Image: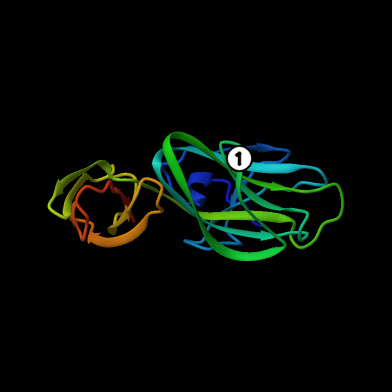
Amino acid sequence: ATTAPTMTLAESLDNLALAITTGGNALWAPQVVVTYFDGDAAQSGVITDSQSSYLEFSVTGPGQVAAYWRVDSESGFDGLTRRLDGVWSDSITGFVDWSPRSLLIPTRVHLVRFTYAKDSSLAAGADQGWVDKVVFTTAPLSLAARAQNQQASLNWAPPPSWALALTAYQVFRADCGTCPFSQIGTTAASVTAYLSTGLANGVTYKWLVRAV
């Protein structure tokens, strides 16, 4: 691959707000040959058997990290893995072309790590992984609900302006304390309020608003 020595990893991931760290047996690097967006992407370092190469960054939740991944490796044995605070969250192996994958980030600071790792023998394909176009969207701030007769008025503050190019808000509701959230509506990026209707008086509901 052709590296891009004057480019930073944050630039190759299309997110200058990220402070990227890379390590392992070889470093990830920006390159301009295998790309998904804007002519550049980050590529794992060249490693051999039983070695690994990682890049990582911290984000402050609540929010969501979305990224495009690609891998070309020995299927089932070598591959690209994503971890949150050291805990496995997703992986791809074999040949997988650019694929969008997202991860919900809980409240507070968390570490997201992408690792290309090999087992103890054999190799296939390019034997590397790639990541491109990392987008972190934060949840709206100070979500408040005011109960009315069989409905509730929701209001929230927008996330910081640097966090994303905001296009809309998605509104979700859980109909009991242990019920899953289901999307109930969408508002424009300029609208930070929503009226949740069809409620039963005396029942506890939960709402979640996601910036997209």
Q: In which quarter of the image is the N terminus?
A: bottom right
Residue 23, percent across and down? 65, 37
Residue 20, percent across and down? 52, 39
Q: In this view, does 10 lie to the left or right of 94?
A: left
Question: Pointer 1: what residue?
Answer: 87
Q: Please tell me which residue lies in front, 40 or 114.
A: 114
Q: Please tell me which residue lies in front, 164 or 177.
A: 177
Q: Residue at x 78, y 54 (%)?
A: 77
Colouring scheme, one of rainbow, by chain, secondary structure, one colour: rainbow
Q: Which residue is drawn at 53% across and 55% down?
A: 132
What is the residue that sits farthest to the right in this orientation? 121
Q: Which residue is drawn at 61% across and 62% down?
A: 34
What is the residue that sits farthest to the top in this orientation? 109
How crowded pointer 1 is (Cα within 10 Å; few <14, some 14-19, many 20+) is rated as few
Note whether residue 156 is visible: yes
Q: In which quarter of the image is the C terminus?
A: bottom left
Q: In this view, does 13 lie to the left or right of 88?
A: left
Q: In this view, does 136 lie to the left or right of 120?
A: left
Residue 205, percent across and down? 28, 48
Question: Relative to residue 192, is residue 26 depicted above or below?
Answer: above
Q: Please tell me which residue lies in front, 8 or 132.
A: 132
Q: Please tell me which residue lies in front, 33 or 144.
A: 144
Q: Which amino acid does label 1 sit on?
A: Val
Q: Residue at x 61, y 55 (%)?
A: 130
